[in-house]
Amino acid sequence: MKVDNKVGQNPHKYLETTSSPCTGLCRIDEISGLCVGCGRTRAEIAGWRAMSEPERRAIMAVLARRTGRGSVQGAAD
């Protein structure tokens, strides 16, 4: 795959346009089964890249309730 790195183009565009609640603190709590960083389940984490943006947003909408942390922001927000 050829990447065109012209001035003003970002080769990491996927990361900027894909919402993700990932905080970089990736560890599954053995009791709850949720990631201690973002609150997602293993299945949600594994399927994240294959999900549509509306599916990701729907999951992100419930993460604050799951974790009790208030709002969870995505990378594209």
Image (cartoon, rainbow, N blue to C red):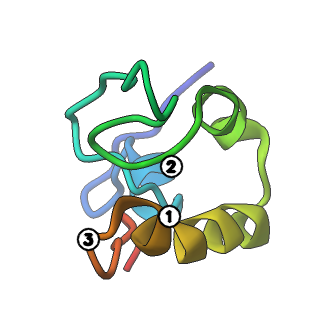
Do labels 1 and 2 touch, CB within 8 Å? yes
Q: Residues within 10 Å of mark 1 (few under 14, many from 20)?
A: few
At a point 35% along the width and 57% down the height, the residue shown is 9
In screen coordinates, is 40 left or right of 6? Answer: right
76 or 54, which is in the foreground? Answer: 54
Say above or below: 39 vs 17: above
Of labels 1 and 3, the one closer to you: 3
70 or 5, which is in the foreground? Answer: 70
How far apart are labels 2 and 3 at the CA level?
Answer: 26 Å
Give the labeled residue for mark 1.
17
At a point 70% along the width and 66% down the height, the residue shown is 53
User: What's the amino acid at mark 2?
Assistant: Tyr
Q: Which mark is residue 14?
A: 2
At a point 50% along the width and 62% down the height, the residue shown is 19
At a point 41% along the width and 72% down the height, the residue shown is 64
- In the rendered image, residue 50, in percent from the top left (x then y), is placed at 77, 39
Q: Secondary structure at mark 2?
A: helix
